[in-house]
Amino acid sequence: MSVPSVGEDARADLAGIDAQSTYVQRDGVRLHVLDYGGDRRPLIVLPGITSPAVTWDFVVRELRDLVRPVVLDCRGRGLSDTGPSYAVAEYAADVEATVAALGLDAPLLLGHSMGARIASYAAASSSVPFGASIIVDPPLSGPGRGGYPTPRAAFLEQLHEGQRGTNADEVQRFYPRWPRPELEVRARWVASCDEHAVLESLRLFSEVEDFFTWWPAVPAPTALIYGGASPVVTADGVREAAAANPAATVHEVRGAGHMVPWDELDAFMAVVRPLLAAHV
């Protein structure tokens, strides 16, 4: 286990947002959480494989009229410690620990990419009474299903650029549609993503853990959101997911790639806000 090393320029981002940094301990791993506070229903947000919690501020700050966002730095990212395992069950147990430590009552769940896999697993298997789950563009890769569309080398390239010090222009090569402020945030924070945490998570959800093992057990109400131009959730994947869990509602964000809210924020919000409003 190691503790995060985050530069002062990145930490300054935390001072500029209206959320409280708090920490949750589980089995010797210290997990960092951004809690936006308030008395509305909690919404636990679980980011993707190289997205620390702060990168979701531009989304969740627009939802505070509906919910109390609680955004987790998944283990090995942001200000959370690394851990001995990156299995989906371990990530889901981190979510349970966060619910217990913060005393969250029947929270809603929203996860993107790797976080969508974690959210769906937690909803399907946890003893926590989650109010509803929103699963955004989960990797449908797994054993016998082919690899994840972003190759390991592309992850390493981005991580190594972050480790030596990157900038928004370099980040834009990978994410040409992103708003400039979000490119800058990623440039400051991508180095906080532990290389082993990223590569081991990628290996597990590409070669070992099959999303469709637990997806049929995710209870209603649950919603699957996907980017209409995403290479991660293809048209065939949408059909298979809809058939495997008929209780789920399915929503396309037209024109968005895998990084759905970064690509098409207004269209994403047009889908997410009514889903949240139905449960608050």
Image: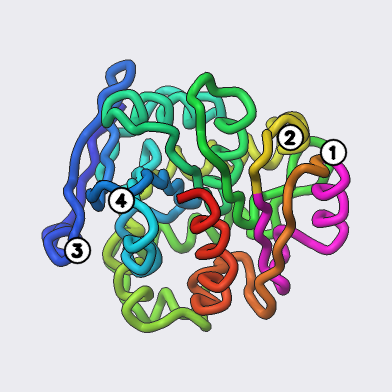
Q: CA distance from mark 1 to mark 4?
A: 32 Å
In magenta, the rendered stretch is 223-244
Which amino acid type is shown beneath numbered disc 4? Answer: Ser
Query: Sequence-wise, which precedes: disc 1 or disc 3?
Result: 3
Query: Sequence-wise, which precedes: disc 4 or disc 2?
Result: 4
- Residue drawn 72% across and 72% down? 228
Q: Which mark is residue 144?
A: 1
Which amino acid type is shown beneath numbered disc 2? Answer: Asp
Which amino acid type is shown beneath numbered disc 3? Answer: Ile
Mark 3: which secondary structure?
Answer: loop
Q: Which residue is mark 3?
A: 17
Q: Which mark is residue 192?
A: 4
Query: Do the numbered discs 2 and 3 sit on residues whose CB atoms are within 8 Å?
Result: no
Nearer to us of marks 4 and 2 is 2
Q: Which residue is mark 2?
A: 210
Query: Sequence-wise, which precedes: disc 2 or disc 1?
Result: 1
Give residue 63's position: percent from left, percent from top: 38, 63
